[in-house]
Amino acid sequence: MEFSVLTVNPAKVETACLVVPLFQDGDLLSAAAKLDDASERLIAQLVERGDFTPELANVQLIPFAPGLAAERLLLVGLGKRETFNEGALRKSLDAAFTTLAKLPVDSAAVAFADAEVEDRDVAWNAQMTLESATRAVYRFTQCKSTQSPAPQLRTIELLVSETNQADSAKAGARIGAALGDGVNLARTLGNLPGNICTPTYLANQAETMAAESAGSLDVEILDEAELEALGAHSLLAVGRGSAEPSKLIVMKYQGADNAEESPHVLVGKGITFDTGGISLKAGAGMDEMKFDMCGAASVFGAMKSVIALKPKLNVVAIVASAENMPDGRAIKPGDIVTTLKGLTVEILNTDAEGRLVLCDALTYAERFEPASVVDVATLTGACVIALGDHASGLFSNDDDLALDLLEAGEASWDRAWHMPLWDDYQQQLDSNFADLANIGGRPAGSITAACFLSRFADKYPWAHLDIAGTGWDSGKQKGATGRPVGLLTRYLLDRESELVVTPEA
Ligand code: BES
Ligand code: MN
Ligand code: ZN
């Protein structure tokens, strides 16, 4: 999405559509008040007569307005001032841009800087606006033989009232547009069916990103022979029943001036289809297990945003990718494998395969001597039961890292909730035959899954995001959400500002 920043009187803005936010209570916001003055009190009268109620996310298109240079007006309700927050702003923006994406307009001027959220600045507001606009024009049409008309919206003009706000608005908008592109890439990878989006497809996706990155991304793909030689038997075990070869995909972005600076590592679960294997899943809704690579998709999305924004830090992305199928060669309940770390695992349930690919990726991460490692995975149905589709489950061996991720989630409104990782739960993974079992029984299923991973993440600050509930939507709106690209990107950008050393006084 293209953007520019304008500081002119909104009544004089020549645009196909002027987007104006209104609270349900109190005076009109600055842009709305100016438009009202110039248009014989059009806006105030619509509200007074009850023709438009500015409830949260209510929108009203006004096809022409006297006295204004804009061809159309789109009024957007913000709800009550008292309850207005980050989430409400996003809801109202999404409502506005969903409407705009269906209109025959290729650009719009947006006065949302007026809709201030406590403790958030103009840059943040502009970021949310561009992200919302970019997400709204997304369509997944790759697998349809006839195309419905694509949204025309290409350019957003951000209206700000003070000239000194223009630079921050631009900086925020740049982040929002890049983030939106990252989210949309994650959605596309997630939405692609399992017969197209295979481990090999994901590996090619990484190669393509590297080729398009003008040298800022290095990619290394480890195939099955290389994984065998390395000793990543746990990852390989998951793909044994599949005709699709497993891959470990490594992407390196070097943005720090010092190449030796410890990288932040993202690890993604890339199960391109999860049948459960020999511990076969029930048939109903199994198609949704094509989304079992949404963790990997979010890592790709975050890397896309990083490449576009070029922060001065080093980032490594590792995607552990396999297809989990039942077959004569597939792993069976009771099988024991030796992980890359050397620990042996008794596979009591072949449907707990995510942790089996992730554990080897976490061990592989050790070689980068990371500043932090964050893995992202559609790991457990239990997490959906615990948190639904609003929050990702956050588990960590480091409280500072957990706090940084929680803050990044709040700031990007892509929230996570901190879950316990107490030692008390570890005993559920005891095995009579191997060092540990791959399941811990029904109680606390998302915690014991995280406990399993924690055994392989003892060499660095580590966190795990269980996105089983947040990675995709079911039902009529079925589709990948692109979460948690927002959280991850914000987390990484915040690490850049951490590196800026203030000179000693
Ligand atoms: N990919 C699933 C988790 C999942 C299930 C995510 C449903 C979203 C919706 C994962 O591989 C899995 O099957 N986990 C099992 C673990 C169990 C066997 C311990 C689960 O959650 O049932
Ligand atoms: Mn599974
Ligand atoms: Zn799975």
Image: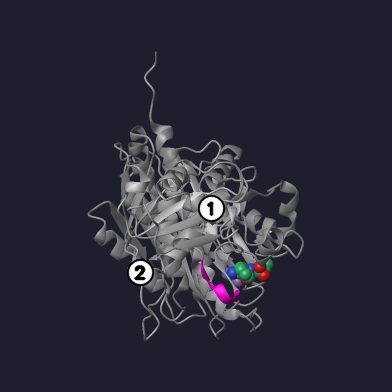
Precedes in sequence: disc 1 or disc 2: 1
Residue 181 position, x and y percent, is 38, 59
**Residue picked out by circle 2:** 104
Q: Is residue 82 above or below residue 393?
A: above
Q: Is residue 48 above or below residue 99?
A: above
- Residue appearing at x 42%, y 75% in the figure: 197
Q: Amino acid at mark 2?
A: Pro
Which of discs 1 and 2 lies nearer the camera? The answer is 1
- Residue appearing at x 61%, y 45% in the figure: 25
- Residue appearing at x 26%, y 56% in the figure: 213
Specify whether tag 2 is near ligand 1 (CB below 8 Å).
no
Residue 480 position, x and y percent, is 50, 68
Q: Is residue 199 above or below residue 77?
A: below
Residue 464 image label: none
Q: Residue furthest front?
A: 40
**Residue picked out by circle 1:** 45
Q: Amino acid at mark 1?
A: Gln
Q: Is residue 340 above or below residue 330?
A: above
Residue 488 position, x and y percent, is 48, 50
In the image, which residues are magenta?
A: 475-480
Label 2 crowd (10 A; few <14 / some 14-19 / many >=20): few
Is residue 317 at all visible to an observer of this figure? Answer: no
Give the Cα separation between the discs numbered 1 and 2.
Answer: 27 Å
Q: Residue furthest left?
A: 214
Front one among 12 and 106:
12
Label 1 crowd (10 A; few <14 / some 14-19 / many >=20): few
Q: Please tell me in which quadrant of the rendered image residue 62 appears.
A: bottom left
In the image, residue 448 lies in the stretch drawn in magenta: no
Quadrant observed for ligand 3 in the rendered image: bottom right
Quadrant (top left/top right/bottom left/bottom right) for the N terminus: bottom left
- Residue appearing at x 74%, y 54% in the figure: 427
